Image: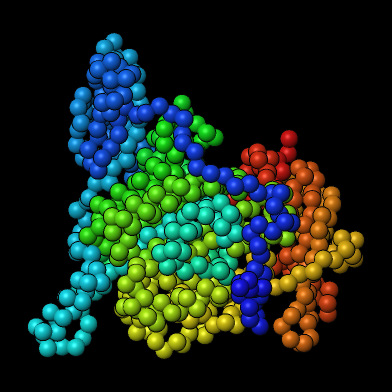
Amino acid sequence: MHLKYLVDSEQCRIPNINPFDTSVRKHFRISKWRPCPGNASLTYQENNILRINKTVIKQQYKNDYPLCKIYPILRLDIDDDHIEYMNESLQFKEDVNISHEFIKVQCFDRDNKKIYVNFHAFVQMKELPHADRSNNTYDNAIISSDDSVKNSHSTNSVDKENKLSLNVLLIGVDSVSRLNFIRQMSLTRRFLLDHGAIEMLGYNKVADNTYSNMIPFLTGKYEDELPESKNLDLIPFDEYDIIWKHYNKSGYVTMFTEDSTSGAMFNYLKFGFKKQPTDHYFRPFALEREKEHSFWSNNGFCFGNRMEVAINLQYTYDFIRVYKDKPYFTLTFITRISHDDMNKAGRGDFEYLKFLQKSSNQNLLNNTILFFFSDHGFRYGQFRETYVGRLEERLPTMYVLPPEWFRDKFPTLWNNLRVNTHRLTTPFDIYETLQDILDIEKAEERSKSNEVDNKNLIRISLFRKIPLNRSCESAAIKPHWCTCHFFTSVAVNNTIVIIVANYLVSYINNMILNSSKLCAKLELQKIINAEVSVSYFGNQVQTHKDYRVIIQTHPGGGLFEGTERYYSNDKQLSLMGEISRINRYGNQSDCIHDNLLRKYCYCNR
């Protein structure tokens, strides 16, 4: 049965759009996996062993074994960009056991000419004082609890050391809406659904880009609520209360992996971290790999004969394999395959499927709750200018897959999760859910009351039953990002629309005023589109209306979308959230390094 709305309540109606709707079909094409063009590698890894590919030796070097050297890559606790190689290098001609995390391999012929370069990432188990306990699985927790009862004649649950620990596996893919995930990543989606994943159909972003949506996800706060939020190009994130610190304190091993370096979550126009933020951190490897320009092909999707996505997912797989008997928290966020072209996400579909299948077949997900998600939909281009494109940008994909035994062990949590598939949810709720996972048994007890703290409707765990009548306002979603409300077209020459459009230009110019020596003053060139909100929530008298306009400015041809509230009583305007830049600005704003202002600045030439 096709439902008209994904969320349908008195406070929120999110339309259920056909992902293959004829109105947008011209904007998408389905991309598929294809092999990378590079030659077979001379070296490959198998667990912690670096192996020589004897077939390559035979075919390319006529059994004349080259001499190879290993150069370990080290991160310096200065900032996120200081990397060095260890002075000592290991020479080898045969398979060798590796004790380092990240290495560069170079091979030389008899004349000492370099004939081969590659990079390998290994997950080495670390002796971590905060992670000295074993992973207490569902079955082990039952046994431990029974023993505790026998020995102490107590009916209390197991102690802290023996409480049930659920691993957390967060797999993020940049700029993929719920609908584009259906279009482009059908193999991955089918795996998730076949294994019982719950899709959050009303998952609504709360801000513009990756960083501003992941901060609520990882800290439970908006970015402007963080201390010194305006100076993050100078101040490291080390002292910020990111969720993986909570898992660290609870005895979990932690990992953070990204593919992008310059556009990374905490590094794009920001300082990043001074000290390594998690127990395992992929960035040093990614930085060094980036420098080997000759290895990249297929528009940067391939490094040598492997897709970059596959390398990151292999590292994630190795992490959950190595720490299968320890509680772990891992965040893997992959950007480049989908960030710049909404039709390229499908290129990685088969790699994600292989990762999930292999992890499942090796029983590595038996005690793990998986979140497969995106930060937002596609934010730029002609598709974004359409009605469907605007909705998709605000509705990223989100799937939650607990282990199979979870539904029997925690029936209330499972049922609430299923109910919430048709409720309005946000990244703030994911943060609260991650907090619940830290003590999942207590979360089960707490959820049985089915009472939600009405003073905290901003952050509600997905394991609590989210109120059907939750509104964007109560969930702290600003009107500009809210998908709950219906808008209808209004003429671009409407008097109020013209006032709203000019207000938007003035607002942008005020934002860049302090950078006026660098940025040109913008003028309204054209009103592209205008809409006004329509209330379908009863007959109450409205004192205001929200207008959403798309304008083009000069110089630079920037396309901006803003939502302004017009108060009919005193004819005042108020901006209701950020102003979206919906076409690419390329190098127009290279003269300025402010993360927010880059969207609006057209550099004086």
Q: In the drawing, does residue 577 fall left or right of residue 171?
A: right
Q: Residue furthest left?
A: 151
Can residue 594 be seen from the camera position used here? no
Residue located 35% across and 23% down the image: 116
Quadrant into which the C terminus falls: top right
Look at the picture and state if 391 lies above or below 517: below
Where is residue 298 shown, x and y percent of the image? 52, 33
Q: Quadrant of residue 414?
A: bottom left
Viewer-side residue, 605 vs 33: 33
Q: Residue furthest top?
A: 111
Looking at the image, what colour scheme do you see? rainbow
Where is residue 194 shown, x and y percent of the image? 43, 63
Quadrant into which the N terminus falls: bottom right
Where is residue 436 shown, x and y percent of the image? 38, 74
Can residue 168 be seen from the camera position used here? yes
Look at the picture and state if 105 lies above or below 60: below
Viewer-side residue, 592 vs 577: 577
Q: Quadrant of residue 288?
A: top left
Residue located 76% across and 87% down the image: 540
Residue located 71% across and 49% down the image: 26
Where is residue 29 shown, x and y percent of the image? 63, 46
